[in-house]
Amino acid sequence: MDAAWLQLSHGQSGPADQVRRVDAPNCRLMVLGYCGATDAELASVARRVGRGELDALSGVGGSCVLIAVGPDDAFVIGDLAGQRVVFYTHTLDGDLLLGSHASHLAESTGKVVAPDWLAAYLTVPRASDLWWTGSPWRGVHALRPGWALRASRTGKVEASPLVNLDEPLSDLHTAGAGLALALRHAVADRVSGAERPTADLSGGLDSSTLAVLAARATPSGLSAITLEAAGVEDSALATSIAETVPGLRHLRWSIPDSVLPYSDLDAVLVPDEPTTFAANAARTTWWLRRIAGLKSDVHLSGEGGDAVLMALPSYLGDLASRSVRQLWSHALGWAKLRNLPSHALVRAGLALRGTSYSDALRTLAVQLVTSESTPRGWATLVTWLGSSRTVDWLTPEARALVASKLHEYAGVAVGPVVPGRFGIGDSTSWLSLIGFGRGQRLYADTAARLGVNHHAPYLDNEVIRSCWSAAAWIRTTPERAKPLLAEAVADLVPASLVQRTTKGDYSGLAYRGLKRNADFLHDLFTNSELAACGLVDEEAVRWTIDTGVAGLSIPLGAFDELVSTELWLRAQRSRPASQPRPKEGHLARTR
């Protein structure tokens, strides 16, 4: 095989040590991203793949893309969390292009925006298997997490599932032991060669666990950073934790009003795809530049902890099939915590038990087209898809477009596309995870552009496998916050951290930022690009802005996605000269 069969160009978006290559008979294996495997272990994988054992690729850990090139075929697989997305397209000449950035590949397809993808992404985020294989650009596709893309020398390209996780049958103790091992390995391997490692220390269980593990694995010490906001208790809790950990240097940074959410949106670094954090770009940029100023060579973040450690409330549908008594027990617990009627949760669990995924897709499609008002509140999360809270600002044309995609998908979807025999809770949580991972890659990409080597260990393959080894109702209970992580680190971190039952609420910052930047947001949704695409009713968006400014609750997550998508579209129409194009990352071409 000659080297032209699979070429890499444009370099990598991360540190140079995140590109590795090993050769074996009939297989050249390339690893792009973080992988804790030794060279000998990777060589073993390459030999197995060279013998035709393709499933060897599914067992590689870390958070990376694997490219295995043989005499006649090339195989590509990304990570389980969807943080390392593999995009692909065909040129007019028939060449297959693979890349880590959709926007770069789109240059080979004419850079035509795909409004139907944008509409689905904004409207049904929890149905990520519906929109995952697309991108904001027509003709640019994405490989599902856990799937392998096979490209033959003859030009044939096909994607098929490769990873098949075991059925989640582990008890809390067994799964916790596996998670503890995975986290210790993920943290120690990253910081062992670092000279100036840094980490988040929010005061919450996720990031604080990583900071404690990193401090203990770093002889030279670790700088752990806490963001302080008025009225949020996290800073005091983080301080109490830091005082108990030798070698941990605690830095407390107050969030200035100048970087409140929705500030300086006209100066946002343009990401590869729309992403929620763009609405908080000012704070993100301020934060990352300060970390870069510490000369950090590895920064650990607790991002992704919620996505892997807790299941969505839809797991109550599993309990309705498993044990009505257990369903009542969980429903009573959640009802007490959230001041809800327990019978509403029980009814929702029982109803979900008898609802197929395809029926849920069709029901949501009907609700979109008829503009039917969907119920709101925590109990509505006990569903396959949640409820669409963006209907108010979607145009009838956009709703019809998404409804058509939902009906079409319902006709072929036996169930959600997940890598194993999962129940409802594990399936919906998986779809939520890969939706989160796809956005998280953009955060890491922005960090790299600002000089920060950003890592989210909770999104490593081994960590995910450990979490999904226990069923949803085991790792999520009303009695104990994140019981799986608490079980895993009970003997490793301060007791005060494991026993914490509260979580900091930063939504007050969002509403302050909304009020402070209302005029800009009004202008943003006057003659907006989303309206030009026929997707959004600008008047409804401006009404939402005014509602938030008045101090009333609005769906902040969905609104942030809307703002971010508008900013992304505007950047595609006219990229300011002051904003250089981001590094494209890894790019491959087959001939």
Image (cartoon, rainbow, N blue to C red):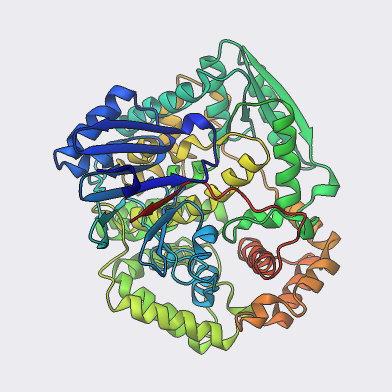
State the image coordinates of residue 293 (x, y, percent, origin top left): 74, 29
State the image coordinates of residue 475 (x, y, percent, origin top left): 39, 42
Residue sitting nearer the eye, 62 or 166? 62
Task: Note whether residue 156 is visible.
Answer: yes
Quadrant location, the C terminus? bottom left
| Residue at the image position 40 percent from the left and 77 percent from the top | 406
Q: Quadrant of residue 485?
A: top left
Q: Quadrant of residue 574?
A: bottom right
Q: Quadrant of residue 212?
A: top right
Task: Note whether residue 78 is visible.
Answer: no
Q: Is residue 149 above or below residue 218?
A: below
| Residue at the image position 20 percent from the left and 45 percent from the top | 71
Left or right: where 327 falls relative to 100? left
| Residue at the image position 31 percent from the left and 74 percent from the top | 358
Residue sitting nearer the eye, 428 or 325? 428
Q: Which residue is farthest left? A: 51
Q: Is residue 460 above or below residue 75?
A: above
State the image coordinates of residue 172 (x, y, percent, origin top left): 33, 35
Residue sitting nearer the eye, 487 or 418? 418
Q: Is residue 54 above or below residue 484?
A: below
| Residue at the image position 47 percent from the left and 33 percent from the top | 18
State the image coordinates of residue 386 (x, y, percent, origin top left): 47, 67
Q: Is residue 284 above or below residue 95?
A: above
Quadrant location, the N terminus? top left
Left or right: where 136 falls relative to 250? left
